Amino acid sequence: MTNEVTSYSSLLLIVLTATIVPLVVKKIKILAVPIVVGEIIAGIIIGKSGLNLIHGNISLDFLADFGFAFLMFLSGLEIDLKFLSIKKVNCQNQWYRTPLVLSSLLFLGTLMLGFCLVYVMGLFGVVSNKVIMTLILSTTSLGVVVPTLKEKKLLGTEYGQTILFSALVADFATMFLITLFVSWYSSNNSLHMLLISFIFFAFYIFYKIGHKIMKMKIIDELADGTSQIKVRIAFVLILAFISLAQILGVEMILGAFLAGVIVSSLNERGTSQIYNKLDAIGYGFFISIFFIRVGANFEVQTVLRNPKSIYLLPALLITAYLVKIVPSLIFKLNFSWRETLAGGALLSSRISLIIAASSIGVRLGLVSNEINGAVILLAIITCTISPLLFNHLFHAQTK
């Protein structure tokens, strides 16, 4: 009974904090701080590094883990497969200037430059595993990129689509590569790595079956009210892919992401209310628990007491911006210098996936607690600074 009371008390405190954070962040008009950053900071205040009011238990851990999975699900929900078939009329009929190609080249540049810089850091004993650190630094934040582009009404433009595709390619490719790396490192079994392809086969099957189901008249009839059949189908998909990922020994982030892509492909983005409903469920409850728990478990003292952290954070911060801004210079093929630099700055923002990738590294023993702490601070800093840099550069461009 005592543990049950403790569980509900901690959950109440987290939900109360999640409710207060947006109100406080909204009042801070000097800095456009993302809500998720506010949630992490609030978690630090009420967690181990602050008041120590949050006590871990299985129930909270489950809710936080599912919140993370739901965040990856919503990232997949941002992908519109129809964009892949649209020909870009402003690319002067040159295939290498299309948003998808530019985005892919940018990601390859990020990987190569990232590995080179991480290799140099490794020479000084800063990092132990170069591959996982390269993947950690290759991430970006859809949760920051999409709202920023929406605010500027750029999502429908060639420039906005190029930035969006760059974020999508970075997120999807990084998740896939992390999954491959974890499977190889954990089992060192090529057969186990081949099993990963089965989740993509399942993606194709669910995609085909889903299209037939969504054409049924009864689905639209039960879409609202007490039925909410589309929301229920979405939860079936996310849990099915998470379960399949666990069975195959694949990271759940890939399964949750693919489930989001399926739901996105089954619903019209302009007319379906499913997007707003799932956003409300995710950001209104589950995802906020994840980010507050990240802050609550973050031990600031561990970072500050270790001399290694003094130079580690600046080194990671410089590397994080270089691996995005330098490859993004390829945008100059289509856009002005200010637009190019603004895009690189925005893509340098990181929050959810970088924290997830770092957490996976900690679990595998490849990332130390000091580096993990520095990565969380890096996420907070880039998520705060990058949108401000983008707004400044793009605002100056439009004058």
Image (cartoon, helix red, strand yellow):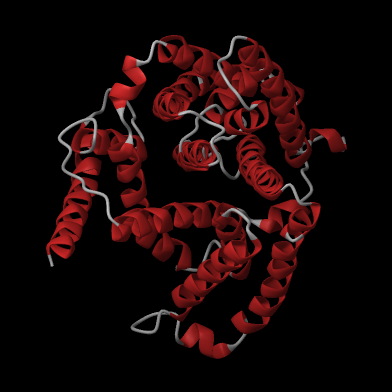
Q: Which of 309 and 18 is in front in this view?
A: 309
| Whole-percent x, y for residue 46 in the image | 19, 38
Is 114 situated above or below 268?
Answer: above
Identify which residue is drawn at 19% across, 53% down: 10
Q: In which quarter of the image is residue 66?
A: bottom left
Q: Can residue 264 be seen in this view?
A: no
Q: Can residue 5 be seen in this view?
A: yes
Total marks in image: 0
Left of 8 or right of it: where is 171? right
In the rendered structure, the answer to whether residue 286 lies left or right of residue 359 reads left
Q: Is residue 135 above or below residue 247?
A: above
Looking at this view, is 235 or 326 the one in front? 235
Q: Picture coordinates of residue 126 (x, y %)?
A: 55, 16
Q: Quarter-wise, where is residue 377 in the image?
A: top left
167 and 394: which is toward the camera? 167
Residue in the image at 45% along x and 30% along y = 372
The residue lying furthest to the right in this view is 94
Vertical order, 116 against 380 (above or below)? above
Q: Position of residue 264 (x, y in %)?
A: 58, 63
Q: Where is residue 73 in the image (x, y as percent from the top left)?
A: 52, 57
Q: Quadrant of the N terminus?
A: bottom left
Q: Which residue is painted at 87% across and 35% down in the image?
A: 94
